[in-house]
Image (cartoon, rainbow, N blue to C red):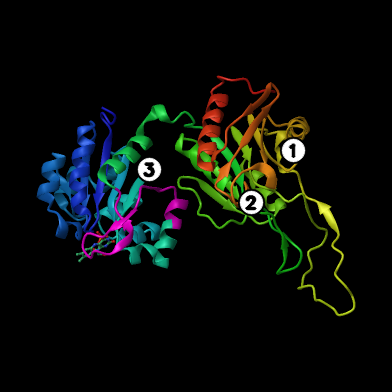
Amino acid sequence: MTLSDKRILLIVGGGIAAYKALDLIRRLRERGARVRCVMTRAAQEFVTPLSVGALSADHVFTDLFDRQDEHDIGHIRLSREADLIVVAPATADLMAKMANGHADDLASTVLMATDKRVLIAPAMNPRMWSHPATRRNLETLKGDGVALVGPGRGEMAESGEVGDGRMAEPLEIVAAVEGMLDGRLKPLAGKRIVVTSGPTHEPIDPVRYIANRSSGKQGHAIAAALAALGADVHLVSGPVNISDPAGVGTVHVETARQMRDAVEALLPADAAIFVAAVADWRTADSAGEKIKKVKGEGPPALQMVENPDILATVGHHEKRPALVIGFAAETENLLANAQAKLDRKGADLIVANDVSHGSGIGPGGVMGGDRNRVRIVSRSGVEEWPEMAKGDVADKLAALVAERLSGRAGSGQ
Ligand SMILES: Cc1cc2nc3c(=O)[nH]c(=O)nc-3n(C[C@H](O)[C@H](O)[C@H](O)COP(=O)(O)O)c2cc1C
């Protein structure tokens, strides 16, 4: 039984999908979990504490000010005596409360008082899901390390409307719970890993900047894959248009110098992976005012200076992590350049990807696209990985990091 002796505190919110919580309780218990339930007042409009109690075979907690419950177990113990808290369905209202630190009923107070990980399964009308307030709350919750399962796309139970917002099916939620609680799947538990991702923006003046085509998709996917293996991941991200990965602490920066400072502040770490496409150069002086186009004067001459080399800085740092991995985006002489980089920068591995137009990878190419083909260059040789989705590259690289940090493979140093 995959969840033997695991204690799940299930918080049932007041949405139409509350009926699916009954099946979820059954599925979790089938796998050996002990399920204790808290229901919001609204949840009791949809399913009764009697049904929830019968399926969980336990007392159901509904009231923060119930003197008997508070005497018997108390809301603080309730929030701590669990291996994981699951909120299903997570209503728009519960998400807003969680994101803003409200504690005005038993469910929200338990969520504020807990020291355990929290998994939410949102369920709501598509308009509520896409509302800017819910988007903001979701980003806040992700930043707080709250894990998410679903929602999916489908027909809404009550209205026949179709769209995003349908709660994940009970078995999907069970799989997410198993993923979060199975220690065997967490080979990076206790490892602190710093990852950089995205481009940097180097200002020319207050409105213009030098940038590159990096989307952050590969770096963010790697951060998420490492977190899924249990690592304590700190992501330093340049300006990107994608969400921060769940369960990862993210620091947002703009320039190469800010990225270097943020990375150094996060050391010591067990590993550092430099995926960001850091600008090699910046302008010597960023103009304080917008540079004007003056008739007859021609274009301004931009004086460039070199940016700090973050990989080399950390590769030779007094707090150098045991494992340092750099990415080399090259358009020519891929392997020769990657091998030279390995030595020069004090890295253990270089992940070399060909970002040239001739790389054969679909529209948009590697930078900004969804697929990647990489070679892993170490001092002992080169391993070619076939073309795959960036998420798959991330999973494979996270597994390699786990292998290296567990000492099952030499560091190459
Ligand atoms: C029939 C009906 C269905 C509802 N379904 C949802 C839903 O699926 N998701 C949601 O966020 N709110 C839904 N609501 C609104 C919530 O019940 C309401 O926001 C409530 O305050 C949530 O309380 P809670 O977050 O404490 O459980 C529904 C309301 C009604 C009357």
- Using the rendered view, name the quadrant where residue 117 is placed: top left
The quarter of the rendered structure image containing the C terminus is top right
Q: Is residue 65 left or right of residue 230?
A: left
Local crowd at mark 3 within 10 Å, few (<14), some, or many (≥20)?
A: some
Q: Circle 3 is placed at which residue position?
A: 117
SS assignment at label 2: loop
SS assignment at label 3: loop
Query: Is 366 one of the magenta-colored residues?
Result: no
Out of 358 and 273, give the one closest to the viewer.
358
Magenta part of the chain: 139-168
Q: Circle 1 is placed at which residue position?
A: 312
Kindly report the distance in space between the C-alpha atoms of the residues bearing marks 1 and 2.
20 Å
Kindly report the distance in space between the C-alpha atoms of the residues bearing marks 3 and 2.
32 Å
The residue sitting at 47% across, 52% down in the picture is 143
Q: Circle 2 is placed at which residue position?
A: 214
Residue 126 seen by the camera: yes
Local crowd at mark 2 within 10 Å, few (<14), some, or many (≥20)?
A: many
Q: Position of residue 318 (x, y in %)?
A: 71, 33
